[in-house]
Image (spheres, rainbow, N blue to C red):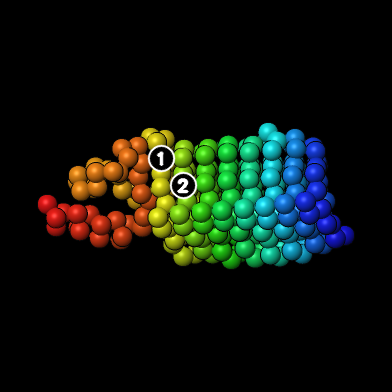
């Protein structure tokens, strides 16, 4: 059936295994745990501006067969999208992940969007599959793991930052540029931060800095 819980206040919800024709959770506030494990969204699924305040939110093995929106979402607890299937897109732009987030084995038929997303905890995309993905102006403040992820076209990255000394495994064409790479030409570059860019762009930047020496 269609579900309209826009701007609703929900406490400890368990939609495990439920099937939604159309679901609207825009600006809903979830207190406590929120579970959608194995749920199926046949039509549009909307979570724009939703806030998850509990210890854990889980969409493990959920299926989104149409357009889905997780834009401007605040995930305050551990976030689980492992084994989730997106039949059209995966839209997480401008979302905040306060704790660890798991996207392992996620499958996206078209494109995954993570523009302006902030990952305060570790994030893993191990064995994730997508036609394409875009990470733009993102902030990775802990570990990031893209090992064994498969993309039909190289995932796009631009103006992203990596903070701290956590262990990170990027896709093959991504590299980190640190203050050391700047060769002293960028005095304000924080020592614990790195810019995450595509490998070809990194080579151009390094060549430009070397030409100034």
How crowded pointer 2 is (Cα within 10 Å; few <14, some 14-19, many 20+) is rated as many
Q: In 3D space, how far apart are the residues under numbered discs 1 and 2 (Cα atoms)?
A: 8 Å
In the rendered structure, the answer to whether residue 126 lies left or right of residue 161 reads right
Q: Which residue is mark 1?
A: 163
Q: Nearer the viewer, residue 44 or 80?
A: 44
In the rendered structure, the answer to whether residue 45 lies left or right of residue 92 reads right
x and y, in percent, of residue 126 in the image: 52, 46
How crowded pointer 1 is (Cα within 10 Å; few <14, some 14-19, many 20+) is rated as some
Q: Nearer the viewer, residue 76 or 168?
A: 76
Q: Nearer the viewer, residue 89 or 140?
A: 140
Q: Residue furthest front?
A: 188
x and y, in percent, of residue 24 in the image: 77, 57
x and y, in percent, of residue 62 in the image: 72, 51
Whether residue 66 is visible, yes or no, is: yes
Quick one: SS at disc 1?
strand
Q: Are marks 1 and 2 in contact (CB under 8 Å)?
A: yes
Name which residue lies at 80% across and 44% down: 9
Name which residue lies at 20% across and 58% down: 208
In the rendered structure, the answer to whether residue 23 lies left or right of residue 143 reads right
Quick one: SS at disc 2?
strand
Q: Which residue is mark 2?
A: 139
Q: Earlier in the sequence, mark 1 or mark 2?
A: 2
């Amino acid at each position: 059936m269609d579900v309209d819980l826009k701007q609703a206040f929900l406490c400890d919800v368990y939609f495990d295994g439920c099937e939604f024709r159309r679901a609207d959770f825009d600006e809903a506030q979830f207190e406590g745990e929120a579970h959608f494990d194995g749920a199926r969204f046949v039509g549009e699924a909307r979570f724009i501006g939703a806030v998850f305040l509990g210890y854990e939110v889980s969409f493990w093995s959920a299926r989104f067969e149409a357009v889905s929106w997780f834009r401007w979402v605040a995930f305050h607890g551990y976030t689980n999208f492992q084994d989730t299937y997106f039949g059209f897109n995966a839209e997480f732009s401008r979302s905040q992940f306060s704790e660890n987030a798991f996207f392992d084995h996620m499958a996206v038929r078209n494109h995954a969007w993570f523009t302006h997303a902030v990952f305060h905890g570790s994030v893993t995309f191990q064995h994730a599959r997508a036609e394409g993905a875009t990470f733009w102006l993102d902030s990775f403040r802990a570990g990031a793991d893209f090992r064994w992820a498969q993309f039909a076209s190289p995932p796009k990255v631009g103006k992203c930052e990596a903070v701290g000394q956590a262990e990170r495994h990027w896709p093959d064409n991504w590299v980190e540029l640190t203050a050391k790479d700047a060769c002293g030409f960028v005095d304000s570059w924080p020592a614990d931060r790195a810019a995450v860019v595509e490998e070809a762009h990194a080579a151009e930047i390094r060549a430009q800095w070397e030409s100034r020496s």
